[in-house]
Image (spheres, helix red, strand yellow):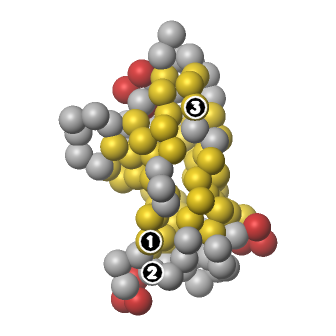
């Protein structure tokens, strides 16, 4: 088990940037993958990006070229840098720890991102 605390959400204008942080209660070095999900009103929760323990990253087509996921093992923190934000990016963003065969993983509390003029 790992506790995840998110920060960095807020209100931003279209074209702006935000950096989300997910601080873990223990080392994330051995965690299979760290993920960012989002859920907009009336929509299914969707995977935005992930980064594996080996450093492999993947992104949803809708955010490729605009979002960057990164990891700082020394700080037990994963980040999501979001640039060129669009109104369609408005959602609650969740951090998730994927621990593979050890269990279902753990979720952060979510942080609201609103992109609006």
Spatial separation of the CA atoms under disc 1 and disc 3? 23 Å
Per the model, the C-alpha gap separating discs 2 and 1 is 8 Å
In front: mark 3 or mark 2? 3
Residue beneath the point at 72% across and 64% down: 72
Q: In this view, does 38 lie above or below 85?
A: below
Q: Can residue 67 be seen in this view?
A: yes
Q: Name the residue under label 2.
A: 99
Give the vertical position of 14 relative to 78 (above or below): above
Tag 3 secondary structure: strand
Q: How many labels does the image show?
A: 3
Q: For the residues marked 3 and 2, what is the alpha-carbon distance in whole angstroms?
A: 29 Å
Q: Percent from the top left, x then y, of residue 57?
A: 51, 60
Q: Report the disc number at residue 10.
A: 3
Q: Is residue 105 left or right of residue 30?
A: left
Q: Residue at x 51, y 66 (%)?
A: 34
Question: Would residue 1 be found to the left or right of residue 8 on screen?
Answer: left
Asked if 22 appears above or below 28 in the picture, the reply is above
Dot 3: within a 10 Å radius of its alpha carbon, few (fewer than 14), some, or many (20 or more) residues?
some
Secondary element at tag 1: strand
Q: Name the residue under label 1.
A: 106
Mark sitting earlier along the chain (2/1): 2
């Amino acid at each position: 088990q790992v506790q995840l605390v998110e920060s960095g959400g807020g209100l931003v204008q279209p074209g702006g940037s935000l950096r989300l942080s997910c601080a873990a209660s223990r080392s994330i070095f051995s965690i299979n993958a760290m993920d960012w999900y989002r859920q907009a009103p009336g929509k299914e929760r969707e995977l935005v990006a992930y980064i594996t323990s080996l450093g492999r990253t993947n992104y949803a087509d809708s955010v490729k070229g605009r979002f960057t996921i990164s990891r700082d093992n020394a700080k037990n923190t994963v980040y999501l840098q979001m640039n060129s934000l669009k109104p369609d990016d408005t959602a609650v963003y969740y951090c998730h720890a994927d621990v593979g065969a050890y269990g279902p993983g753990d979720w952060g509390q979510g942080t609201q991102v609103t992109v609006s003029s």
